[in-house]
Amino acid sequence: MNKEKLFSWIDGAGALAVELQKELTKRPAVSPESGGEGELEKCLFLENWLLKHGIDSLKRYDAPDARAKGGLRPNLIAEIQGSGAPSGGGETEGSFWIISHLDVVPPGEISLWNSDPWTLIETKDSQGHKLIGRGVEDNQQGLVSSVLAALAFVKQGITPCRTLKLLFTADEEMGSKYGMKWLAENHGGLFHENDIALVPDGGSPKGDAVQIAEKNLIWVRFVTKGIQTHGSRPDQGANAHLAGMELGHRLHSELKEIFCDRNALFEPDFSTFEPTKKEANVPNVNTIPGEDVFCMDMRILPHYTNKAVLCEVDRIKNEVAAKHKVTIEYSLEQSSEAPATKEDVPLVKMLKEAIFDVYGLKAYPVGMGGNTVAAFLRRKGIDSAVWEKTSDSAHQPNEFTYVENILSDAKVMALLLQN
C-alpha cells in the first residue's frame, strides 16, 4: 500500500518537477573560478521552496569564501526522521543520504546554444517531456528527484525506514573544496559508518549502471623555468616551452606503459594521463620563453596508489629538467583516492532491486573515471552508490533531461527509503 501511495504521488508531480527545474535554472550557481558568484542565491531559493512545501528540518553549513556572493559557499541539509531513529535523536540506525550538488558549469560557447542557457525550455520528442537549460541534468535532475522522493513521504504521511538526509553541496564541479571536502574536514561528525548514501550524479542512458568505484585522481600543474632569449639565439637561453612539451609527452607515454593494467569495471578500462590546460607564455613568435605552464589530468585505476604515480612523475621531471637545463616544479590541484563499495552490500542489492522494479532492467556494477562526492564517503567507510538514468548531456550546449526520468528516478529513491 505504501508503495502504491508513494508512486501515485510521484506520478502526479510532473508539474512540480518542471516548476522546481525552472526556478533552479534561472539562478546560475557558477563557481568564482569560472567567473560566477557561487551558490548562495540558488540555495536561498531552495531553502524557501522546501519550507513552503513541507520540509522544515533544514540546516546550513557555510564554507567561507571571500570571492563568492555573501562571502560563503552554502551546503544545505534537509532531514526527514525515519522509523528506525532512536527517540531523542541519534544515529544508531544510520541515516540514508541522497547527495546532489548546487553548482553548475558555465554555458560555454553561447553560439552553440539554441536558447538562453539560464531559461528553462520545455519541448517534447520521441523520448518524452524534454527540459533544456544549463544544469537541468548536472545536477538538477538528481536534486529534483531526491526532493520529490522526500516529498512523497511527507505528503502521504509515510515515515521512511531510515532517517533521510538530503544534502545539497557547493563546489562539486571544481573539486568540492568548499563542499563535501570541507564538510568532511570540518563537520565530519555528520557522517557515520552505518550510514549509506546514494549520489544521483552519474549513470547510464538506460538507468542500469550502478557505479560502485572511481578511479584515483591527480590534477597537476607544472611550472618550467628556463632563460628567455631571442628566437634566433637558443644557444643563449633555456627554452622552457620546449622542456615543458617534452615533459608532457614523456609523462603521457611513459606513465601509460608503467601503469598499464586494465580493469573491465571501468570505461576506459585503463589509466589515463592527459595534458590539458596550457597557460600563455610569451606573446610573440620570436622570443624563446623563460617560463612555461601546463596541466595534466590523471585518472588512475584504484589498485595503484597516487604516491607510486608521483614517484614516476618526479623521475621523469628531473630527467627532463637536467636535459634542458631548466627547473621544473609542480603543484597538485587535486589528488584523491577512494576504496570501492563492494557489490554485495545491502545498498547495492536494494538499489538493483529498485531499478528492476521501476525500469524492468537488471542493473550491473561499473566504475567511473570521473570523481563524485561518493569518494569522500567511501574513505569514511560509508557504502555509497552513484546512480541515475542519465541523458549524457552534462556540460554540453543545450543540456537536457526528461521529466519522465526525474519521476522514475524518484520512485527508485522512494523504494530505497521504504526498504
Image (cartoon, grey):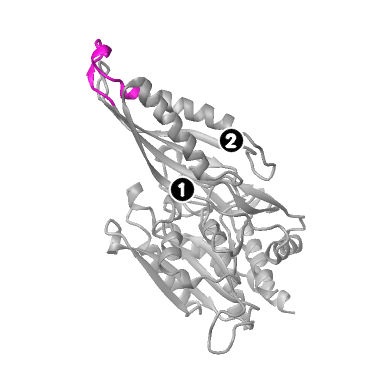
- Left or right: 84 with respect to 255? right
**Residue in view at x 51 percent, y 35 percent:** 273
**142, above or below 264, in the image:** below
**62, above or below 162, in the image:** above
> Which region is colored magenta?
226-242
In the rendered image, is residue 241 in sight?
yes
Name the element at disc 1.
strand
Neighbours of disc 1 within 10 Å: few (<14), some (14-19), many (20+): some
| The magenta stretch spans residue 240 | yes
Please identify the residue farthest to the top as the structure is shown.
232
**Residue in view at x 69 percent, y 77 percent:** 5
Query: Which residue, given by chain and number where applicable, does mark 1 sit on?
Result: 335
Q: Residue 244's x, y, as percent?
A: 37, 26
Q: Which three-letter amino acid code belongs to the residue tagged 1?
A: Ser
**Residue in view at x 50 percent, y 65 percent:** 19
**201, above or below 285, in the image:** below
Please identify the residue farthest to the bottom as the structure is shown.
87
Q: Residue 225's x, y, as percent?
A: 29, 29
Name the element at disc 2.
loop
Neighbours of disc 2 within 10 Å: few (<14), some (14-19), many (20+): some
Locate the C terminus and report the quarter of the image it occupies: bottom right
Q: Who is closer to the viewer here, 379 or 346?
A: 379
Q: Which three-letter amino acid code belongs to the residue tagged 2?
A: Phe
- Residue 259 - label: 2
Locate the N terminus and report the quarter of the image it occupies: bottom right
| The magenta stretch spans residue 139 | no
Eye-nearest disc, 1 or 2: 2
- Mark 1 or mark 2: whose residue is earlier in sequence: 2
Give the image quarter of residue 239.
top left
